[in-house]
Image (cartoon, grey):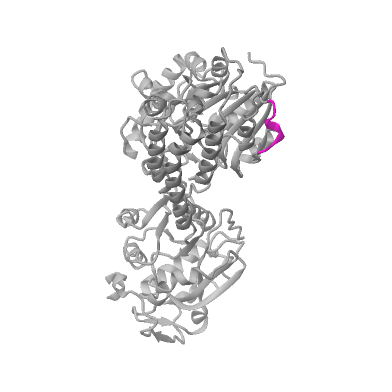
Amino acid sequence: MINLDGKKVLLTQNTLRGFSGSEIVTLEIATYFRRHGAEVRVFTWEVDEPILSEFRARGIKVTTDDYSDYYNDLDYVWVHHQILPIGLLEKFRDKKLKLPFFFFNHMSSFKDLPIEHPYIYDLEKKLPAKSLFVSEEAKKVLTEMYGKFYNTARIFPNPFPDEFLRKEVDRSYEELRRVLVVSNHPPEEVLELEKILRTSGVVVDYLGSASKRYQLLSPEILRQYNVVISIGKTVQYCLAQAIPVYVYDQFGGCGYLSAKNFEKARYANFSGRGFRKKSAEKIAIELKEGMARAKRFQNERHGEFIREFSLSSNMEKIFEKISRTDVKLEESYISYVIASQNMARNTILLRQIKDVNEELIKTQAVANERLGIIRSFESSGAVKLARAVRNPREVLQRKLDKAREKHKKPEIVAVLCVYNEELNIDGCLRHLEKYVDKIVIFDDNSSDRSVEIARKHKKVAKIVLNPNKHEWDERENRRAVFRAALEVSQKEKVFALCIDADERFEIRFLQNLKRITQKLDEKTYVSVHFRELWGDCDHYRVDGVWGDKKKDILFRLLPNMTFDYPQKHHIHWHSAELDRELLLDYNLYHLKMIKAEDREARRQLYNNLDPEKKMQTIGYDYLVDDKGIILKKITTEERYDLTTVPDYYKS
């Protein structure tokens, strides 16, 4: 048992925002240190909810302060992403300082993820430290690339905290009843499982940032299910709980763990890499037919899994034979490390720019090559060091400056919520593609070819599939599609252009779209006239309520947007925070009122959804009432792209 009473521990992490990967590792390691008597602080470059509340609930302080007094007289520093506060690095200049012991934990084997790599030359070798790797795959990949960077290297396999341990395993065998999918990026074949398994009475729930249920996983949640589909750390949670786990996610996976695939799956940190992808139908069959074998395998090796993957046993191993030592770092090397930290921080804060990683890899390779010629920083001195790293640093700075400028340019993302729109969606996307940067679609479980057609369009950056289609809920759909739009864009300014598949903007509006966004602030949304085409594609109705219709279609997306409108349907596209309307004299044309049969179908749909007229007091019979009708012909100035309208409406 490790005794850390009175010890001061610092953990570092690039950003702390959500429930994913290294963020959860940081939370669990910090909790472990605190429970074993240590005083704990976490340093990060950026922190936000929802994970911040979890640190606070455990009494663990999180800081972004580079110069905290807490960094005096530290005993241990647990490092993720090679990040250290500048104030601590400045203390290295004190020749009398006895350095704390460092654990450098590397949690990825991806070659294209520079921040997971030892980008600071020789840091882990020069400090009293151990280098830890999440898997044998990560250790092999990184040591092949940067072997000279490391000190004592060992596996720290993303272990599970003790609260997940189930000492008495359930040895009963039952049929598949409840499945939990834990993923922040579930592939389509996994999203389709809910529909397939529902027919046989199996409940499939989803947990993660891509679903409506986003929270920290707990033993209590896991025990509600008899099978879990996931990868990574969640696999180990299930091994601890003796719950059959089906290893599968965006990379594919091995399916249920068995004696045949376990070693290969563990080698890649149960990530699913190294195995093929499967169809939803095949996954459903394997879930049912293989559950008993999987449970038997996990029960038989439960004790072995506890010894290998529990956090307590792994911490005891890595704390063996460590001591703080007197290490003296040259002034030139300390300056280099501080400069590298500042550069990395700028890069992380620009993480939204997708091409920055690619540029970093190229520049890092140059920097590492030039730094490799320095056999000893102590003997080379500051002049030679500066000569070795100056050019790569200047190249990187230019790349970052260019990326910043690109990041500042606003981006327009068209968003659509669709359900069985195979007739309209192709034309809708074609009329938008020239004028928007990206398109995001929320599909509400269409049974036709809507999704298949949408995927053929290059501007479609993401299609969010609703995994829990039980009822129509516009509020939740809005949240999901706008969250996806922010994810695919990740620019400083992102504007949402909202449209349905059966609508078309007039050309004049689309041509002026970028100019309009330049004048919008964070509180203003744009509305346009909503024109119901009637009888043919060239006329719209203007008598009575028809001439007054409008629709909010354009506004800036912000990270924390709410849609807490009292009703579930007929809600605004814009979020509740936007309180200023800008009505522009442009038209948005609606195709599904052209034909009488479509108008009648629309009336019946809304009467069924809202029989008591709670969401629209005038009801819906007016949709088919043509008394006193007045039609206006579309002028040349008001024209829209008629070539994108299906022939169905033209006949």
Name the residue located 51 percent from the left edge and 83 percent from the top edge: 544
Name the residue located 45 percent from the left edge and 21 percent from the top edge: 173
Query: Is residue 68 found inside the magenta-colored segment of the image?
Result: yes
Q: Position of residue 343 (x, y in %)?
A: 51, 43
Judge whether 351 appears above or below 133 on screen. Answer: below
Q: Position of residue 391 (x, y in %)?
A: 42, 43
The image quadrant that residue 457 belongs to is bottom left
Judge whether 229 appears above or below 621 on screen. Answer: above
Q: Is residue 185 visible?
A: no
The image quadrant that residue 246 belongs to is top left
Name the residue located 30 percent from the left edge and 33 percent from the top edge: 276
Query: Is residue 15 found inside the magenta-colored segment of the image?
Result: no
Q: Is residue 301 visible?
A: yes
Q: Position of residue 548 (x, y in %)?
A: 52, 80
Judge whether 533 appears above or below 16 on screen. Answer: below
Q: In the picture, which quadrant includes the C terminus?
A: bottom left
Magenta segment:
67-73
